[in-house]
Image: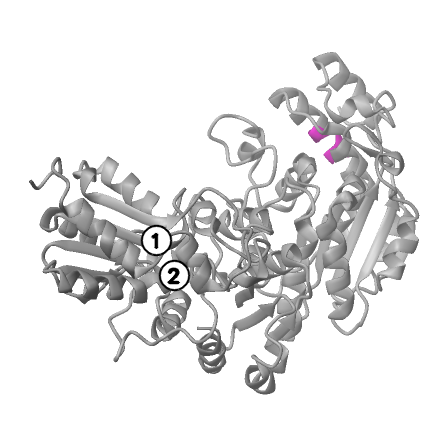
Amino acid sequence: MINSTQLAARFRARVVEMSHAAGTAHLASSLSCMDIVAVLYHSVLRLDPLNPGWKDRDRFILSKGHAATALYAALAWKGFLTEEQLESYGRAGSLLEEHPSPKLEGVEAATGSLGHGLPCGCGIALAGHIKKEQYRTFVLMSDGECNEGSVWEASMFAAANRLGALCAFVDFNKWQATGRSREVLALEPLVDKFRAFGWEVHEIDGHDHQQILQSVQDVSPSRQKPVMVVAHTVKGKGVSFMEDDNNWHYRIPTAEEVQLAKAELGVL
Amino acid sequence: MRNVFAKTVTELSDIYPELVMLAGDIGNRLFDSYKARHPDRFYNCGVAEANMTGVASGLAASGMRPITYTITPFNTVRCLEQIRLDICYPDLPVIVVGTGSGLSYAGLGATHHSMEDIAILRTLPNMHIVCPADPVEVRLALHDALQLGRPTYIRLGKKGEPVIHASDPDFRIGRGITIRNGSDVAILGVGNMLATALQSAEQLNHHGVSAMVASLHTIKPLDEELLAGIFSLHKLVIVLEEHSLIGGAGSAVLEWGSLNRVDLRKLTCFGGPDRFLYACGEQREARASVGLTSENISQQILSRLQEPDAPWS
């Protein structure tokens, strides 16, 4: 069976192709969170694509909805989407829009406007708490997203209600759309902030699959504290000429750049 | 309305094990009975309405039936994007309840007035907008909203509104209720203006004008059958609402009339002006300052009936 590292490389090659084919932006944002997405879908989330509404499934919300291609690649690999559906990404009439739609199976919340995923994740986790269910809820946010006040409202809510089955990641790639995230607003110290808000915080290398896996081990309804994983990442990770270059927040790769990227990723 | 709302959700929470109350740090003691019966299904979400609305969407997506509750402007326009994207876009069964709507909290100043909520929320696809007229309609609206299972906004007044319905009417979201028959003029009272509509009808009666009065408790979807009937049978159609004239129930009727080619010269709308109210005063004074009194309304209706270029003359 394919391991999560191979899977992340495959997903990365796929989203580079998708960005080129559909002419859509936010490629570097998809690349930066890809290891987190790959580990969760490969080794963590309990899902059943034949029964997408299974009540005991773990929930995953891509709160940074602009990285939709990363989610679509994972949903297709898992079996929620067909290869034909994935091919239709961005085409007129396709349900695979540039931000995830609630009409798609496997998509737990409509995201794209930042700051919505964590409150929604709190509600899903709270429902599990009320009904004494065992599922876990995972939310993946961007660092720029932490500009939104609703992230901090939700952080206080999760801690107050002891939502131990809730886990959020910050894909901390140090960039937002138009600048360094520590310069646009006073984002740092991010780890201390979430700790002060009452979360159990892990600070990890967001490209190290073992660290990602370890950071979510304690997420459980039997725990009292929600888990925040501040994952240090590199925007555009995996493609040397895109890494840490914020032009790739909006740039679309040429056919030649797609081939170069795939060669670097070892996916041909 | 407020007390009946609390009493009704307490009763409904026994029937619906999925019902969850989310409150925005208001209603001190109001929900004591509910909390005593179902402590695991009441959450004070603090002064954080965006999160409260998002939490409601997550609960609803997981099979629960949440109701969000706080003062109207904070539960509507403050968290509008959460209502739009988290509730309406996925079409989830969340009931948003605003208390102190319109000019109910006039004395608290424009921060607590809500004269724009209907206009804004009715533009959202999948949303239903219900304005109960009295405590009886509050109870029935909650029952029906839970049956409906779609995004629903319930616009409450405050406390102490008079009971209008002596017995339970046939209340269905989207269907107006005729309170009084009359042949000359039809007055549609929206929410807590229904009492004023009835007073106006009584005053018109003293002048020999026969007025029918209906509770137009649902602004979206509109009761098209009711509207078609009154536009064909009555000389004048009056919409009366404690909401801005821009975009409210009157505008909704106007849009319907335009699409359906009815004679819109018959329509007169009473509501609030396009300005904030700055002066002190309780609901009674605030209503008077914008002409929302039965005396002014009945007088204006009498004047309109005497206009020489009226469609019926």
| Quarter placement of the N terminus of chain B | bottom left
Relative to B73, is A143 on the left or the right? right
Q: Which residue is mark 1?
A: B219
User: In terms of sequence position, does the residue under pointer 1 or pointer 2 come before the other?
Assistant: 2
Question: CB under 8 Å between callouts 1 and 2?
Answer: yes
For residue A136, what is the image quadrant? bottom right
For residue A21, what is the image quadrant? top right
A140 inside magenta stretch: no
Q: Nearer the viewer, residue A174 or A7?
A: A174
Q: Given the image, what chain letter belongs to the residue carrying mark 2?
A: B
Q: Nearer the viewer, residue B36 or A42?
A: B36
> Considering only vertical position in the picture, is A104 above or below B8?
above
Identity of the amino acid at label 2? Cys
> Considering only vertical position in the picture, is A27 above or below B215?
above
Task: Say the numbered circle drawn on residue B11.
Answer: none
Q: CA distance from mark 1 to mark 2?
A: 8 Å
Q: Kindly identify the residue that appears in the image at 9 percent across and 50 percent down.
A: B233
Relative to A31, is A204 on the left or the right? right
Measured as percent of width and height from the top left, residue A252 is found at 71, 19
Task: Say the numbered circle drawn on residue B131.
Answer: 2
Which region shows up in magenta?
A10-15
Do callouts 1 and 2 point to residues on the same chain? Answer: yes
For residue B177, what is the image quadrant? bottom left
Q: Nearer the viewer, residue B246 or A100?
A: B246
